[in-house]
Image (spheres, rainbow, N blue to C red):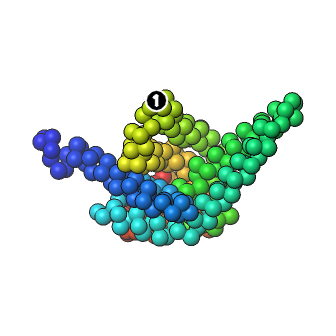
């Protein structure tokens, strides 16, 4: 087989990488107003899920834009709630570090636990928003329930992100410029793509394998789902026939 055959594995994987690169750049651009980061994250995860499903559109930019629009309202609200939590944790931290003695140590432990609990649920907020139609309240609830129910995958996801940040910015402080460039071109997309491996396993608790491509809410699901999303509503295109989708 010709190495550069358009239907060969090399060109196939290069096409995937090109789509990840495009989504990464779009994510950075759409995040610039800052308050739109939630919608941009949801769109990024929707596109990464579609790539894993081999259900990406021929025009990836259009698919990203459709997902961004569909997630704009709820994704923005979720992000603003996260920002409020960041502010609260920041204020709490400055109060805690001023304390001394046993009381100070107790409050430092409580600060660490609050950060850990928040991080657990945060991992799933925008992947859930990207995949399911649900209320903000139920998305928040499901994120934290799923983070505990799928604890091994939650830990692996956090370790992946933490490891990437450490290698990029802390292992070699002199290479910060290169790290910023890599994150701006591929970093966010690659991490979201790899994390989708863990989310795929975790989401099996919500999406039993026996479901059809059009996601009808399963009665045996462990979490609250008002209505499972059809591939078209999240990815901007119709589902493929007899495709099991992201399980």
Q: What residue lies at 45% left-to-right and 37% top-to-bottom?
A: 176
Quadrant of res 55: bottom left
Q: Is residue 52 above or below residue 43?
A: above
- The quadrant of the rendering that contains the N terminus is top left
Instruction: Judge left or right: residue 246 versus residue 82.
Output: left
Give the residue pinned by disc 1.
Answer: 172
Q: Is residue 203 above or below residue 36?
A: above
Percent of width and height locating residue 146: 63, 50
Q: What residue lies at 37% left-to-right and 48% top-to-bottom?
A: 185
Q: Say which of 138 and 83 sits in front.
A: 83
Residue 143 in view in this figure: yes
Quadrant of res 61: bottom left
Residue 50 in view in this figure: no
Q: What residue lies at 39% left-to-right and 43% top-to-bottom?
A: 182
Q: Is residue 112 above or below residue 88?
A: above
For the image, the number of numbered tags is 1
Q: Secondary structure at mark 1?
A: loop
Q: Say which of 187 and 195 sits in front.
A: 187
Instruction: Judge left or right: residue 92 versus residue 208.
Output: right
Percent of width and height locating residue 11: 22, 47
Percent of width and height locating residue 104: 83, 35
Percent of width and height locating residue 139: 63, 60
Q: Say which of 179 and 50 sits in front.
A: 179
Q: Which residue is outermost to the left? A: 2
Q: What residue lies at 46% left-to-right and 66% top-to-bottom?
A: 68
Specify few, some or many for label 1: CA neighbours under 10 Å numbering under 14, 14-19, or 20 or more.
few
């Amino acid at each position: 087989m010709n190495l550069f055959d358009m239907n060969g594995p090399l060109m196939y994987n290069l096409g995937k990488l090109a789509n990840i690169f495009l989504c990464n750049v779009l994510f950075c651009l759409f995040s610039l107003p800052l308050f739109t980061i939630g919608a941009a994250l949801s769109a990024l995860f929707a596109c990464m899920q579609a790539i894993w499903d081999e259900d990406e559109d021929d025009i990836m930019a259009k698919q990203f834009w459709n997902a961004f629009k569909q997630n704009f309202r709820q994704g923005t609200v979720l992000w603003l709630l996260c920002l409020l939590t960041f502010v609260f944790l920041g204020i709490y931290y400055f109060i805690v570090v001023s304390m001394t003695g046993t009381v100070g140590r107790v409050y430092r432990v409580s600060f660490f636990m609050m950060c850990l609990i928040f991080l657990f649920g945060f991992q799933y907020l925008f992947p859930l928003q990207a995949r399911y139609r649900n209320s903000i309240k139920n998305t928040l609830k499901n994120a934290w329930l799923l983070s505990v129910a799928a604890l091994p995958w939650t830990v692996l996801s956090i370790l992946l992100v933490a490891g990437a940040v450490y290698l990029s910015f802390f292992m070699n402080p002199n290479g910060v410029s290169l790290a910023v460039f890599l994150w701006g071109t591929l970093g966010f997309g690659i991490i979201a793509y790899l994390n989708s491996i863990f989310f795929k396993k975790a989401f099996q608790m919500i999406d039993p394998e026996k479901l059809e491509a059009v996601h009808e809410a399963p009665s045996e699901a462990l979490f609250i789902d008002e209505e499972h999303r059809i591939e078209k509503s999240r990815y901007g295109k119709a589902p493929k026939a007899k495709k099991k989708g992201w399980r």
